[in-house]
Amino acid sequence: MQVLVLNSGSSSLKFQLFSMPEATILCSGLIERIGFDDAKFIFKTNGNTIEVIEAITNHKVGLELLSKQLLHKETGIIKSADGINIVGHRVVQGGASFNKTTEITPSVKAKIKDLFSLAPLHNPANFEGIEVAEIVFPKAKQVAVFDTAFHQTIPEHVYKYAIPNEFSEQYKIRLYGFHGTSHKYVSEKAIEYLGKQNSKIITIHLGNGCSITAIKNGKSIDHSMGLTPLDGLIMGTRSGAIDPSVIFHLAKKLDYSLDEINTLLQKKSGMLGLTGYSDLRDIQAEAEKGNKACKLALQMNAYRIKKYIGSYAAVLNGLDAIVFTAGIGENSPEMRKLICEDMDFLGISLDAEKNQVRPDRLTVISTETSKVKVLVIPTNEEVEIAKQSVNLFKN
């Protein structure tokens, strides 16, 4: 059985084609910097890599480029679209409608579309992936794996907001949590490494979108994102947590409309608003050149994460391990250092030499004497999505 997994981020698209149930990777790749003139398309098969840099204006254009490459007569991987049995889609926001992996039907698509406002940078891209896949792979079963599902274990006293109950109940306003597939995958790897089910772990997913989760005995009990992926940590273009009064201030003082404020906080804030760059690689390079705005933004980013680590350690009543994952978490020794320094009170001690890694497997980067293990675990949302998609049709 061949399963194609599409994982659409706010400015990226990761994909893998698996032979299941062995989870053998037939091809994989990435489209990054979507929306920019220098977007990069990488397509990998055994012993062969194709890399193209060109303008990719949106996710739909990127998906069409991918489908052409998959079916390419000379460098493609499948002879016919009918060779794909299942297409597994990462869908960020499932709202109150979806708490498990679901086969995509017209009614499911309609509900995903209704949730655009709760994940405006993601659900539209996820939806486009579904629509394109339905056309390119008409005989394949289309499956949605929701980011919010893993966080359904968050207790009511944590997910509920202090607003009048009728709003919470009628409009399903609550903390949902995101990046659930990633947090689930790396936390299970960490638990396996620790060799204990009764574990207290903090997983930190750092990419263009960033989130942090408190996980007790394998279950999510708190998470930095809320009703939407806008809350919490500072991100590539998203503000993260701010005083809600900022919205009223912008509306009154600058006469901004709600749409303008939404665009500002979703697409023009975060690291982009602070530095003019949304890609951490650019920000780190500029900081090394002495750019004060970039240096400050890195400090702000690390400080926000430190605050969550401290609060989650309190919520968990202890801490066995913290896990760094995703593009920045896996590939930025500089950010890991900024986050972990001066955390000895919590028993966190980073090994400077071990930290200079960009690992392809679980790697310990804490010192031998560190009470808390600091792990870098490459996330693999795609294999998790593939497994859940196949399991959906087992019964």
Image (cartoon, grey):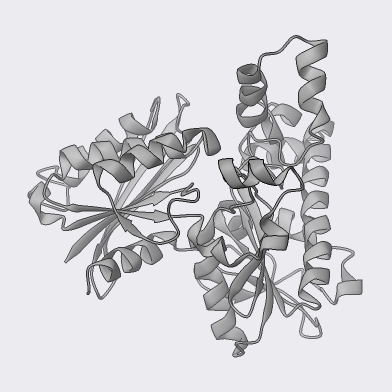
Name the residue at the front extreme: 166
Please determine whether, in this image, residue 7 is positioned above or below residue 316: above
Q: Nearer the viewer, residue 166 or 30?
A: 166
In the picture, measured across the screen, residue 362 lies left or right of residue 23, that is right
Residue 153 found in image quarter = bottom right
Vertical placement of residue 371 versus 166, above or below: below
In depth, the one of 203 and 326 nearer the eye is 203
One can see residue 209 in this view: no
Above or below — where is 240 with respect to 365?
A: above
> In the visual, does 193 lie left or right of 59?
right
Residue 263 can be seen, yes or no: yes
Residue 236, horizontal then vertical, whole percent? 63, 38
Identity of the residue furthest to the top in this view: 255
Q: Quadrant of the C terminus?
A: bottom left
For the point 30% across and 37% down, the residue is: 63
Picture quadrant where residue 71 is located? top left
- Residue 314 in percent (x, y) is at 83, 70
Q: Nearer the viewer, residue 179 or 285?
A: 179
Residue at 78%, 38% (x, y): give it.
Answer: 297
Q: Position of residue 286 (x, y in %)?
A: 72, 35
Which residue is the extreme one toward the bottom? 195
The N terminus lies in quadrant = bottom left
What percent of the width, then of the height, locates residue 75?
17, 47
**Count of numbered marks:** 0
At x 60%, y 47%, the residue is: 169
Establish if 152 lies above or below 23: above
Residue drawn where x is 68% and y is 74% of the image: 201
Q: Quadrant of residue 155?
A: bottom right
